[in-house]
Image (cartoon, coloured by chain):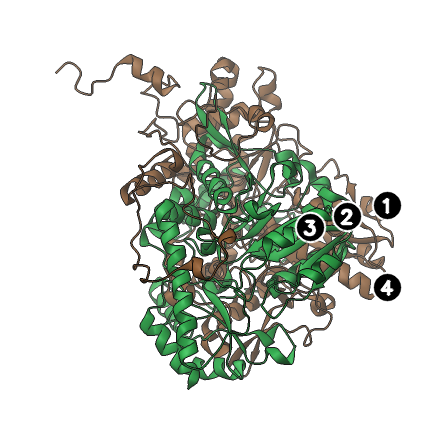
Amino acid sequence: MANPTGWKPSMEKGAGSGADPQDTGLMGATRGLAVEEPLVFEQGSPGRCAISLPAVPEGSDPAAEIPAALLRGEIAGMPEMAELEVVRHFTRLSQWNWGIDTGFYPLGSCTMKYNPKSSEALARLPGFAGAHPLLPGSMSQGALELIWKLERALSEIAGFPASVMSPAAGAQGELCGLMMIRAYHVARGNPRHKVLIPDTAHGTNPASAAFNGYSTVTLESGPDGRLHPETVARAMDEDVAAIMITNPNTLGIFESHIAEIAAIVHAKGGLVYGDGANFNAILGVARPGDMGFDVMQYNLHKTFATPHGGGGPGSGPVGVVDALLPFMPLPVVVKEGETYRLVTDPAERPRTIGKIREFWGNMGMFVRAWALIRELGPEGLRRVGELAVLNANYVRAELSGHYNLPYQTDTLHEVVFDDKLQKEAGVSTMDIAKRLIDHGSHPPTVYFPLVVHGAIMIEPTETESKETLDQFVAAMRAIAAEAKADPEALKAAPRKTVRARLDETRAARKPVLRWTPGMKVE
Amino acid sequence: MRYHPHTPGDVRQMLDVCGVSSISELFRSIPEGLRLARPLDVPAATDEVSLLSEFQRLAARNRTEHPPFVGAGAYAHHVPPVVDQLLLRGEFFTAYTPYQPEIAQGTLQALFEWQTFVTLLTGLEISNASMYDGASATAEAVLLATRATGRGKVVVSAALHPEYRKVLATYLASTGDEIVTVPHGADGRTDLAALDAAVDDRTAAVVIGYPNFFGVIDALPEAAAIAKRGGALAISVTSEAVSLGLLQAPGALGADVAVGTLQSFGNGLNFGGPAPGFLAIREGLVRQMPGRVAGATVDRNGRRGFVLTLSTREQHIRREKATSNICTNAGLAALAATIHLSLLGKSGLAHLARLNHARGRQLRDAMKRAGFGLCFSGPTFNEAAFEVGDAAAVVERLARKGIAAGVPLSRWYPDPRMKGALLSVATELHTPELIELFAQSVRG
């Protein structure tokens, strides 16, 4: 048999990328077999349905009860598919995706660690998954006990007397924290007008401050990548409500002047907000509550391994110091004897800021986070911080010299390089990121933090093995070499994905945000 | 520790490469006085076998043997096992925000499909990629309206979900915007005369539940017309999205913005979270829209693909000038809804909605036979408020039998006439026999 697979060179053209089929990449990436998949709205056939439901009782007639103007028939455009078509559709889409389960995902500041499978089984126990949020207290003691225990554990882990559990994600945690800060100042007679934010901050920080009616003052970090007390002292006055600090910051550098900075802010009556996005770095090693932070959000979908799910759901509980306890939004769970109770009535907490989302919080995420804390215990939690920092420093040591390190300062759980050494050959951070895909890794976070031009922000997390890091290092070094030898080849990356580089400008200039019949995007 | 792959040999080699002699040396940038000198005070580590039994004991302390007759913003529906099996594909589950579109086409196309489903259900032109939940989506919709109109007053129906109203008030605490609440009438619908009187040339939005918190199909077309006359936006809020398979689309009735949650599709109750909030708008409002949105484009080879787009509205680009601070939203919960809606399709959705309406009818009939009338005369979908004498006492009594009867409206409405009002729902999970048993149990 001359050609048992029937492969012809012309097939590569159809696949669009022309990648060398022998090229497996240094992290094992092959082309694989990916199947083109139209939208659900572009397939199926009239009359098909993929659902099995009880019959509608005979004699049921909505039109007899509801005015005709408020009724609709079947919705034109809805798909009509059999079950296997739907199953294949989403299975194929999943194959177009990269997840932690697929391979390395060193997305800095996102803490893409392994999401334990046993947590999924636990969260799906009918007693949790099937519990209605408005069950009477006597019927929901298990859920309340779990929330209470997780709240106690998170507060201990971060060093705060109590934590608000309800925020739906990190950014909502920030919002909630700033609302409490505002309420605190209002109670003292003046909400104040400004929030100080270092130039290394996440974009959510200034957005959350603005959402609360605060204007933001950007603070420059020093040449060592740290925020310096004198910078804070110069900006600090009695119109500053709070400073928002991520520690370690988004360069992975510990803000070692934090205690002094907190003292400066506190002396003028301001409060210190901690963005807990990078909490993984110091888990079990140090506690924000011991450093002078007054508020901090935890990102359960980062530090506590609940799945990121392609962009949520997250969960962003918020730890607070005693001075902010009266302002916590409701609900809170209290333990009275052996009974757990939701406090939802503002009459019990007259100074509460109110409520920031429906019901009580992302319970599904609480179950998973509590499972992780239970399985790790005190030693395991500390090991998280230690190994996360070890992994990041190992990558840093192995890549130094191959990529420019704009800050020589010690780093913890992540490290930020830039494209200075590759720029000379016309190769940018974006090219490096896309080429990494062809080797078999998700790219790092790129072009952030903003203080580093062409930033490449790598956070390996503690769940990655030395072998994975070694492969990643080999791939990154190969890309650095390729940038010198054959920069044009880099620009063609990625070549193994189902799509080549996408035209983002076109997407924004001519927005197509939903399917419509006959839709064409060319 | 099964999640930590490091052998002692690995650690030694890695420390050598780092040029340090111990892991603690890597933390030298943390001043000694700020380090924790003791182990964390959390329970000792446990193994998977013990973990499972511990969590089973906890879960068993929640009584969930019967489908709850409580709705009030979270609805128990049949989630086909297909949904969860697809959702658990690790490539979806363990992906993050699709910032690198070439290896996130699965998430991006699914979001584009979610957006399309939301526009089909709501009859509006544009949807974002999801919100945290229905309540915060409502607050974000109002903020959108204040930006779009440049006005600072919002008129809200008293029959809008009280939790949503609380969240709205909390979100608006720092903006200085004014919230005016207009009462509901005896039919459980928003009092249109009061609404008309409250809307003026300072009003940014009118917010109305559809169906509203009482399960009543509120007067959305009339409310939207009043909003339009006043130059305000009409915002419709839907918590029980199955209703949109039977009821006219909010956009077709004049709503400019439709928000709520699609928890009813593909998502369990999970004690109230997570749930996929949605936000849909008319085309002209797109620059004011909060949150992420997926859009279609082409790749270098001219093939269709998807990316996150219009990001110049968002926090990571605009920082303090962003339309919202929202970042991570409810991606996976939105995917669950998208899968379920794909399975349902055109006829399945209509069937499910009609079945739910019929179950609501069976519940009303059973309660009537048991001697309990309706609190409100307006038309309902699958949920309704019943006059049962002392609703809180009924809930307590049925809880002892393991039945979640509903919620007493007095919890949110102090009016003494609400003392007897019990808000209950029946969905496809409630068989006619269970409904009958329930009604008889309420009678006691």
Residue denoted by label 2 = B151
Q: CA distance from mark 2 to mark 4?
A: 27 Å
Tag 1 and tag 2 share a subunit: no
Q: Is residue A264 left or right of residue A52?
A: right
The answer for which chain carries disc 3 is: B
Above or below residue A328? Residue A459 is: above
Q: Secondary structure at mark 3?
A: helix
Residue denoted by label 1 = A234
Question: Splitting the image into 4 quarters, where does residue A125 fall?
Answer: bottom left
Give the amino acid at mark 3: Ala
Residue denoted by label 3 = B227
Q: Residue furthest bottom?
A: B444
Give the amino acid at mark 2: Arg
4 or 1: mark nearer the eye: 4
Q: Secondary structure at mark 2?
A: loop
2 or 4: mark nearer the eye: 2
Q: Residue furthest left?
A: A1
Q: Which chain is green?
A: B
